[in-house]
Image: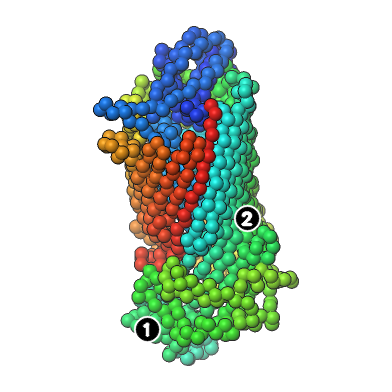
Amino acid sequence: MKMKNQLNLFFVTLLCTVFSSMAVAQSGNIQGTISDENGLYLPGASVMISSLSKGAISNFDGKFTLVDIPEGTYVLKVSYLGYDDTEKEVVVNNGETTDVAIFVAPKTTELEGVEVTAYGLGGTSKALNTQKNNINITNVVSTDQIGKFPDANIGDAVKRIPGITMQVDQGEARNIIIRGLSPQLNSVTLNGSRVPSAEGDNRNVQMDLIPSDMIQTIEVSKAVTPDMDADALGGSVNLITRTSPQGFRLSTTLGSGINLITDKAILNGSFIIGDRSENGKFGYMASASFNDNDFGSDNIEAEWTDEFEYYTGVDDAEGEPILEEVDVDPYANVFEQRKYLVQRVRRSFSVNMDYKFNANNTIFLKTMYNWRDDRENRFALGQEILDAEDIELGDFTITNGVPTRFPAEIVRQSKGGIDNDRNKNRRLEDQRMQNYSLGGDHLWGSLKVDWMASYAKASEERLNERYAEFESEYIVNSDVTNSRYPRFYAADPTDATEFSNFEYGEITEENQYTEEEDFNMFVNFEIPVDLFGYEDGIIKFGARGRFKTKLRDNDFFEFDLEDTYETLASVPLKDYTDPDFYAGSQYAIGSFASEEWLGGLDLEGGESVPDEFLRANFNVEENVYAGYAMTNQKLSDKLGLLVGLRLENTNVTATGNQIEDEENVIGEITQESNYTNIMPGVHLKYDINDRTILRFAWTNTLARPNYEDIVPSLDIVSGDEEIFVGNPELEATTSMNFDVMGEHYFESVGLLSAGVFYKDIDKFIYTFQQEAADDSFGAGTEGFEVYQPLNGDGASVTGFEMAFQRQLDFLPGFAKNFSLYINYTYLSSSADGIRNEDGDEREDIDLPNTAPNMFNASLAYADKRFSSRLSANFSNSYIDEIGGNDFEDRYYDTQLFVDFNASYQINTNLSLYTSINNITNQPLRYFQGVKDRTMQAEFYGQRITFGLKYDLFNK
């Protein structure tokens, strides 16, 4: 309560300062926009009144504001990398705001008497100017830059940024890792409004849901300021949609292509249309995107063990089988081969509007609706060694310490959905994300006010997801001589094709629904306050409320159709063996129950299977109240300081199920928790000269626990002697961050930067495992294994980043049209307090998801008509999931993606484009313990696209 009163007093004092400033204001203001030769707004432009030593930086809408300007006539000087300096005379009157529009032209440089023109660098200029003039450490990518890479979604575009790696799902970049920190530890916003997550058990935002051509700018803040949400432990990604232009704009794309893994066509199209009224007050921008991609993947998976037992044929006095243990080297005890067939249809719509009442008051509406359908069939051949009591002497062979022959359970599983116009006999995953934001920018005297209220919703619905399994048992040969490509195959080949021996296992149908809703509102106030006599300086303060609800509602049913479909031979079959299977032609997957048969089944009267969904269902409400204050001051002509404080209070109400024996719901448990975090921050920016900058940042950030972890569920699984306990008392993970960065910007539009960073992480969340000391969880639960997420010890991340990009205009002849883009990040991490299955603390273990080396490179060529780019994206292997010991740890393997794209400008408005993605056929690969021990390898093949693009600008 004392802290709350102090916070109230602080804001009352600031408000008094504001209104006193408004009362004495006798000067005028200047407000305007900076645009390029096509009438497109330029963010990050420096606008200066040299005679007053006052300046401003244009925002992402190209808008700038200069307040408290004495009456008179002044010259505005606009500076922008890659563009000629431009000057414009303005007249300022007392008590009025002068409105001005400034257009700048691209620069043509001269090297040793030779005129050099930079082609296609407009997007790079926008990004680098914004990055250069930000006080905090950021990376910015503009829409033009995105278009230069063959990236279909925002996830694939973001992976080009230094310090970022992406986790792949079905061949597309989905989950973002910033500076080695897990996806749930980073924030993603759309126009400053938090993007909700449709993931059920975490906070990950699906970056592959949003098409790249719907976004104008991507800004990654690696050192957040106090006016930004603090839950960005690794960093914050802000996606900025297109704004209305100065004049009419029309752009459309129509394309096609082919996926080589399926030889199926790709269809894609988009359009953008925008304009502004004759009086300049009303503007709009509408855009839409469509992509239909029919692809798939070839997959192998394995689990490894170093234990082997068999039944001696003798039972003990209690009738339990006596087992004999054999010392063996690691071998695969589970092997699975999968064939995926996927149709991904992505649609996106956006309408943005703004209305300018006068020079002092503007309101805007920004909307976006993303809708993706994933239709999937999966055919899986699973093979697992039998339990030790079912293996007898003579059933197995051990060669050089490795089991190479043993009895296994074989499962042929078909996955699909119902037969209707939406599912089409496939499992349909319907994901949607929508965001609607209403806001305004106002100028009251010398007081700047901006506000926004938004509603956002993400959902994932999977209805009528069906599985059919048929099972057999026979002797398999295990070939792990090449442990990167392990393989099980029938010792007697006829066993694999005798489908009458594959008996009915199960037919199931499940429904899943996850939903997250966010209500956001914020207001910011900014006043000019010069504390050090250098004319430029502001105090900014504000408040934000974020109100979130998250629910998951799943069910699962099993159907007894054994009498009707006794064996696999009694159902329609399809052979999915592919001689061009990307993991190797030795993997012959064979025949499965057809998707048409599975989709056509009339499933009624199924038996509910609660242990498949009860623990997964929950309802969480999370309300965050935040306030901040900061000041941005010039300490000298070259040194700028931003210092501030942010306070966030989090209130959580979580409801989960109390479960006994996996399927009996005793009741619901609801618990509440709240915590407050105070986070100061300091940013320093030193301009060595106009193009060389040093930066320092000390920031404090947090990451709230995953929803599933804070649900107060209690699940007692008596059969496995395990207890799963939620923890609504979990506190947020916090981090103290230090950054130092140096940047040099080339006049010819380029960048050389390098820096180091350190993160000291506290209250890292991990899953603790222990034995129940008594029966406090229920009668007979003493000795059960208890699993519960807890706040643990600390962790740290230390890293180095460097980036280089520029046109090679110093080279002779046509070579001057080449440009180079390179960035590299090195990470070192450690995590304390992680214990193994015996309770001993593990040493020398990395923080999960920290890739030690990340590298991006591209070589591009651009002249007046033709442009092309060869791009590479690399990341080292890293620990992804911590097991009970180092043998069981799961690693995400090294990735190297190579892509190529090119375009040809037919005329001013019309161009051709083409691209080839994943030239290296890079698989998604996990390994267990050591690099050669494959847990999963999933191949996607290459994708080729081509098409036409039409652009029309009218300034």
Q: Residue at point 58% right, 30% down?
A: 248
Mark 2 and mark 1: Cα distance apart in space: 48 Å
Callout 2: 10 Å neighbours few (<14), some, many (20+)? some
Residue depicted at x 51% and y 11% = 91
Which residue type does callout 1 highlight? Ile
- Is disc 1 placed on a helix, strand or loop? strand
The residue to which callout 2 is attached is 430
- Residue 704 vs residue 520: left or right? left
Question: What residue lies at 50% left-to-right and 86% top-to-bottom?
Answer: 494
Q: Residue furthest right?
A: 605
**Crowding near the residue tagged with mark 1, few <14, some 14–19, many ≥20 C-alpha atoms within 10 Å:** few
* 844 w.r.t. 381: above or below: above
**Element type at mark 2:** strand
Label ID, residue 398: 1
Query: In the picture shown, does residue 356 fall above or below 154?
Result: above
Looking at the image, which is closer to me, 8 or 55? 55
User: Looking at the picture, how far across and down is residue 766, in whole percent?
Assistant: 48, 56
Reading the chain from its start, which is encountered first: label 2 or label 1? 1
Between residue 494 and residue 304, name the one nearer to us. 494
| Quadrant of the drawing holding the N terminus | top right
**Does residue 532 appear left or right of residue 772 in this picture?**
left
Residue 49 at x, y percent in the picture: 43, 16
Q: Residue at x 50, y 29 (%)?
A: 38
Tell me which amino acid carries mark 2.
Asp
Q: Quadrant of residue 20?
A: top right
Residue 700 seen in this snapshot: no
